[in-house]
Amino acid sequence: MQAAVITFPGSNCDRDAAVVLEAVTGRAPAMIWHRDTDLPKLDLVVVPGGFTYGDYLRCGAMAAHSPIMREVVALAKKGVAVLGICNGFQILAETGLLPGTLMRNADRNFVCKDVHLRVESSDSIFTRKYDSGFVARIPVAHGEGNYYADQQTLDRLEGEGQVAFRYVDTYGAQTKGANPNGSQRNIAGIFDQSRRILGMMPHPERLSDEKLGGTDGRALFESLLEALS
């Protein structure tokens, strides 16, 4: 599996993503600068977390118009898998590859802690190594992770199985207290209609090694390796 990780001014999780990709696949991903205009032959593009362009305007708004994202969008439309994590999710929403938007957290505070996610479906290239309903402990670190879409879009996401992860308590229950940012319907991550694009606010790369305190995020990358190799 050949992967690439995009780096923007302000990215701070690009190395984290690269480390886990190499650990899982045995192959270092290509590191692509935001001003590049060409991508090699790829199976996966990772748009990592961080604070691209200082989060001016809206989070991800400037990065969405960078030269490399035009290529990422083109590849995504051809079926290449794309994973957007945290700021990467915001960028994918800004490009229109994923519906909805990410707004300021409901309490207006930056949140940085471990949360629990319920895997809503194992029927995707990103989640096939999880059991549906599995509750994973994954870190979040964001100020604008409050997922918003109109009710028609939310109903469509639910009806077509495009909700990938949901914030839950340790027992898997969807509660207001388990929601760290006010995201509608406790949504933590969504697929596009093809289920080959995933955007998620939590950071699976930050909990993919026992040395980091847990491995609940590793199965996402192992799923991609199995599906794309």
Image (tube, grey):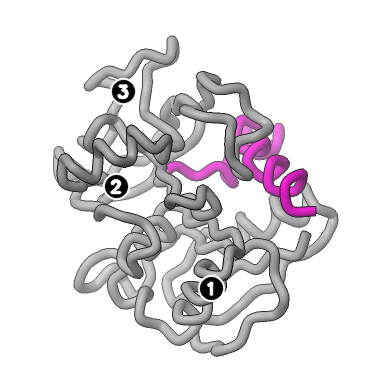
Above or below residue 28? Residue 106 is above
Foreground residue among 5 and 109: 5
Foreground residue among 147 and 28: 147
Residue under the point 55% across and 60% down: 82
**Relative side of 91 to 184, left or right:** right
Residue under the point 28% across and 64% down: 59
Foreground residue among 141 and 185: 185
Percent of width and height locating residue 61: 28, 71
Residue range in magenta is 202-229
Percent of width and height locating residue 141: 38, 46
Residue 145's tag is 2
- Circle 2 — which element? loop
Residue with the mark numbered 1:
7
Q: Amino acid at mark 3?
A: Ala
Q: CA distance from mark 1 to mark 2?
A: 20 Å
- Circle 1 — which element? strand
Q: CA distance from mark 3 to mark 1?
A: 31 Å
